[in-house]
Image: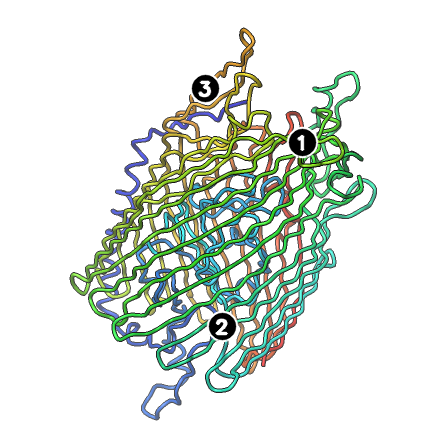
Amino acid sequence: MNLSQPSTLPRFRTRLWLASVSTLCLSVHPLWAETATAKKAPVRAQTTSHARTADSRSVPHAPAAKTQPSAAASAASAPRLEEITVTAQRRRQTAQSLASSISVIGGNTLVERNVNTVFDLQYLTPSLQVTPQFGSGQPAFAIRGVGFNDYASNNAPTVGVYLDEVANPVPFASNGMMFDISRVEVLRGPQGTLYGRNTTGGAINYILNHPTDQFHAGLTGQYGRFDAGKVDGYISGPIGRYLKYRLSGQTQQGGAWQYNGSGAHLGNVDRGAARLIVEGQATENLKVTFNLHGSRDRSDANGMHLYSPLTALNILHPTQYGVFPADTDRRITHWGTSSQFASEIGISPNTKPFSHIDTGGMSLRIDQDFSFATLTDLASYDVASRQEYDNYDASSAAIADVYYQSRANVFSNELRLTSRGSSRLTWVGGIYYSNQYLSDLYRSGFMQSYGYDRAVRYSQSVNTISGFGQATYKLTDKLSITGGVRIEHEIRRLYGFQSYMLTGVDTGSHPYGPDQSYSYTKPSGKFSVEYKPFTRDLLYVSYSHGIKSGGFTTYNTNSPNVSTKPFKAETLDAWEIGNKLDLPKENLRLNVSGFYYDYHNQQIQSAVVNPATGLVGSIVNAPRSHLAGLEFEADWSPLPGLTLTQSGGWTIGQFDKFNSVLRADRINGSYVGVYASRKGNSLPFPKLTLNGSATYKWDLGNYTLTTGMNYSLRSTYRSLFGTLYNVAGYTLWGATMSFSPKSKHWTIAAFGNNIFNKQYDVERNYFVNGDTVALSGMPATWGVQASVNY
């Protein structure tokens, strides 16, 4: 294994970045302060008619009085950047008033850019990376380099995923369909004092569209390259005086873009989902919201391709097999398995890889308003099941084929009290409880590589209870302080663990490994100082302490006593400084931030040594590491109708203390590990991410034509496994166009993604030595849409 080269940048220089950003933030204040003082008209112009949630309908304007300026003059002076309201801190406030790094993606943008799953979000926001593990349906998240790679089903991610404030801690169930969404909020940095679960990387919050006071309905149809089709719609309105409802759904079909040497195609999507939200206003101060949802997925899985010659069989059986050449086209993939493994999992040997994931659940939210606060009780129950067959060797040989059969259910309940009004002190506090159960069966087909198949079977339970609270106090009109704390107790239990060879029939009657448990009681917290040097400018400095749960390695093993030993919870201390500037008169919004992270017990996919059997794949803790970086987001409308956006993130990170095993040598009948220091080696993530767009709205009388271009860039991903597994950086370009009347009763639109047909990979890895596989990114795609709204 080739280790990454140590960085030439001394660690002490990273500690200067926050000071540099602070100097940058402070240096712009005199200039902008002078501008804001001299030009106060924009502040008055920004009335409530311009404040709205992302992509929601604005409040209708009142008829103009005779003494008011002409409509043309008003339009020319009105701010052209909408003010977006978020609920990231459990209360409605503008994103610009939030003293933390947050990106907001509106529902219209998701539709225009054809964002179908969580994987697509990384191309719209800085410092976010979402990777399908070995091309499977299970995503691995990383924000600012804080991530966790694990293809097993049982461990918690570093980034929390929430649907209308309900946490989804099951990794394979977090890649659901994205439809009828108001906005997505992506928060960067440790979370916990406000959210259902602790995370070290950040949070992704999906905010749904809710029932309307008047009847509305909409239907959208889409057709694109590779015969990809999508239809979604909604119906919303009142039921009598006290009830409102919203029923929405979506179906996606087709889209196979990969193929094998025999002309068969892979990649067809076959999924559907529906959601019913009912809101009841029992009294003036009591509101009840019920959410019932479900989805069914019978899609093909992703196919891998060989980016270098396949030598695995030649290494293991040199007299039987030669070397197979690498694939010449990234769209080429291969599949197939042995008759024995096919019989064990109930398929035929030439069955296409598939990813069948079903989800369902419900939530009940009760909001009771009091004069001083709102009491909220949010209870939810969700289930998810997965049957997935993947070909991890990118060939028709039976080298590394896998099959997942998983079922999970999660119950959670959060009770919180949130202050009301706009007094100097605002606060929120509550308690959170979650119970999670997972039953997992994981099979691997190694007949041609190792001469056998294997299976892993286990169950896991997770119980979490925590108390949290956060308060903000305005010392003056310009200076505020915020403090938050969370105390969390969690216990994880792994039981019924079996890891055994398969011989054609899986009876399940095999020896059990030891039951394992891991528990902790740990605090997390946040403290920040926010200063407003002038109207619409916010300077903040913050410290956060985050926690990610520990867990268990559940890979194939001959040594369950060693491999299933729990790894520790990881913790992260984050320092951040930032500035948020909003100039409505100049139609400019600029946010900058810098951060420094101290990482303790970072969870890394590696190996441990069993004296009897040698190396055993395992997740281990790296004692110390650090990260530092800079980010910015800018929105500018230099001309009426023209909007430019640009965002970027630059992050570096290194191990400070970590010895990982290189190999295991057999000495005197026992295996002894050979270790190497990773100190100074770079952490695995793209150092640079950039995203931008340009949109122009053409006023055509009663109609509007909107055209746009967008791009997303990410630098090279440097693997811990050596340079052979680095993923080269790439830039993707896209285009959008829509035409509609100003009433928005109907819209015709078109989009193109990766319009220059960039050839690139999103992941490179290996499951068996000598079998280097990659997941290719999508080639150029296009689509046309037609929608009607009433």
Tell us which disc is closer to us: 3 or 1. Answer: 1
- The residue positioned farthest toward the bottom in the image shown: 66
Q: In the rendered structure, which disc, 3 or 2, sits on the residue that comes first in sequence?
A: 2
Residue 706 in picture, x, y percent from top left: 56, 69
- The residue positioned farthest toward the left in the image shown: 476
Q: Image height check: is 549 above or below 54?
A: above
Badge 3 amino acid: Ala
Q: Residue at horizontal 37%, vertical 32%?
A: 625
The residue under label 3 is 676
* Label 3, label 1: how far apart the Cα atoms are: 30 Å
Tell us which disc is closer to us: 3 or 2. Answer: 2
**Disc 3 vs disc 1: Cβ atoms closer than 8 Å?**
no
The residue under label 1 is 454
Name which quarter of the figure residue 186 lies in: bottom left
Residue 628 in picture, x, y percent from top left: 36, 39
Q: In the rendered structure, which disc, 3 or 1, sits on the residue that comes first in sequence?
A: 1
* Label 1, label 2: how far apart the Cα atoms are: 47 Å
Name which quarter of the figure residue 728 lies in: top right
Secondary element at image label 2? loop
Q: Image height check: is 313 above or below 439?
A: above
- Of residues 651 and 172, the one drawn nearer to the viewer in this rendering: 172
Residue 2 relative to residue 444: left or right: left
Badge 1 amino acid: Arg
Q: Quadrant of the N terminus?
A: top right
The residue under label 2 is 210
Q: Image height check: is 228 above or below 545?
A: below
Badge 2 amino acid: His
Applied colour scheme: rainbow
Task: Bin the neighbour count of mark 2 within 10 Å (Cα to Cα): few under 14, some 14-19, many 20 and up.
Answer: many
